[in-house]
């Protein structure tokens, strides 16, 4: 188990390093000058030369990459070109706000999605199962931006129950003011993901309930609740863990849309701002942070997968 975790951690490091190379190459090896891209096509030659000297763009690419990468290792993401502030604190502040959305969302997705999936599997063929199945297909098919617009129109514009945009820190608005700004973004984030997880749990739960070990547990006279939660559920959760890890990536993509529509000052909106304003240090640092979050989420899923099912062998060794 320890050896497996170490191997997975090394693979996470390798993926993040490869992403730094890819991000650097995309930004610096595209046709045209980075200085032209930042200043625009009408920039003067003197302005371009000054910016190239300021950013060290006249140095060899290997030197530029090492300067940027070594800065990342020290926690130095560079200086934001538009804000003229260190990019690191800006990224971390935005990441903290996005982590609030993502944390609440993933907890809701896991708890509600698993509960609905279990209910559908146990009550297969019932009216509630059919209703949940239709709802799952509907919410999976409809994209986040539709729910964002619908939520703003219904709960903010027509009913006036919740704010349409913005964010209020907990210290300023109190628990109520802070929570009111989170309801709509979180709700629009979790609708499709809950349907995704519950559908997978239903499928894996039905397979577990038809397995030989569940049949043997019932033959021993165990209570149905024990059979369900002690024997069937742990095995049914294994595919759900993989789906939840994938949903973290979908959640990151959804956060970009949701934060933009609701004007929520998180990492997704910051990336959109950095791209629109050609703020390369902010954009490159934000992309690396997103990569780290996704890689760590997959690492956590792999470890939890092995913990729940120790019979699984990785690389020929029992975990």
Image (cartoon, rainbow, N blue to C red):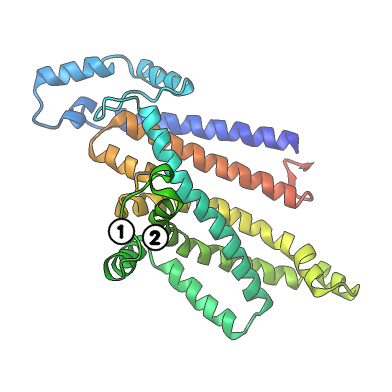
Residue 275 at what x, y percent from top left? 28, 39
Which residue matches tag 2? 184
CA distance for labels 1 and 2:
8 Å
Residue 111 at what x, y percent from top left? 60, 61
Q: Nearer the viewer, residue 223 or 265?
A: 265
Q: In the rendered image, which quarter contains the C terminus?
A: top right
Q: Residue at the location (39% across, 53% down)? A: 177
Residue 308 at what x, y percent from top left? 74, 52
Q: Is residue 97 left or right of residue 85?
A: right
Q: In the rendered image, which quarter contains the N terminus?
A: top right
Disc with the residue nearer the chain's start (1 vs 2)? 1
Task: Say which mark, if any, is on residue 273.
Answer: none
Quarter of the rendering containing residue 300:
top right
Q: Residue at the location (33% across, 45% down)? A: 269
Q: Residue at the location (30% across, 30% down)? A: 280
- Label 2 crowd bin: few (<14), some (14–19), many (20+), radius 10 Å: many
Which residue matches tag 1? 164
- Label 1 crowd bin: few (<14), some (14–19), many (20+), radius 10 Å: many
Disc 1 to disc 2: CB gap under 8 Å: yes
Quarter of the rendering containing residue 25:
top left
Q: Nearer the viewer, residue 72 or 161?
A: 161
Relative to residue 44, is residue 218 depicted above or below? below
Residue 175 at what x, y percent from top left? 46, 51
Q: Nearer the viewer, residue 87 or 277?
A: 87
Residue 202 in sight = no
Relative to residue 84, is residue 125 depicted above or below? below
Q: SS for tag 2?
A: helix
């Amino acid at each position: 188990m320890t050896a497996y975790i170490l191997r997975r951690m090394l693979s996470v490091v390798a993926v993040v390093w490869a992403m730094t190379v890819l991000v650097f190459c995309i930004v610096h090896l595209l046709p045209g000058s980075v200085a032209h891209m930042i200043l625009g096509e009408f920039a003067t030659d003197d302005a371009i030369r000054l910016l190239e000297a300021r950013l060290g763009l006249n140095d060899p690419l290997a030197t530029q990459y090492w300067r940027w990468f070594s800065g990342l290792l020290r926690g130095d993401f560079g200086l934001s070109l538009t804000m003229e502030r260190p990019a690191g604190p800006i990224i971390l502040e935005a990441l903290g706000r996005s982590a609030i959305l993502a944390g609440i969302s993933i907890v809701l997705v896991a708890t509600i999605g698993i509960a609905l999936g279990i209910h559908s599997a146990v009550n297969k063929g019932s009216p509630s199962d059919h209703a949940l199945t239709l709802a799952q297909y509907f919410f999976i098919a409809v994209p986040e931006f539709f729910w964002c617009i619908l939520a703003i129109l219904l709960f903010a514009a027509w009913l006036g129950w919740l704010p349409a945009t913005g964010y209020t820190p907990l210290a300023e608005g109190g628990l109520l003011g802070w929570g009111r700004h989170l309801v709509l973004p979180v709700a629009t984030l979790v609708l499709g993901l809950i349907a995704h997880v519950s559908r997978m749990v239903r499928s894996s739960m039905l397979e577990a309930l038809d397995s030989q070990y569940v049949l043997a547990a019932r033959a021993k006279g165990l209570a149905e609740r024990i059979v369900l939660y002690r024997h069937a559920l742990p095995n049914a959760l294994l595919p759900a863990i993989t789906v939840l890890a994938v949903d973290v990536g979908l959640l990151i993509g959804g956060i970009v849309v949701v934060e933009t529509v609701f004007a929520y000052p998180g990492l997704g909106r910051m990336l959109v701002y950095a791209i629109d304003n050609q703020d390369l240090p902010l954009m490159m640092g934000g992309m690396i942070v997103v990569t780290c979050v996704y890689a760590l989420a997959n690492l956590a899923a792999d470890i939890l997968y092995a913990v729940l099912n120790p019979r699984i062998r990785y690389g020929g060794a029992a975990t």
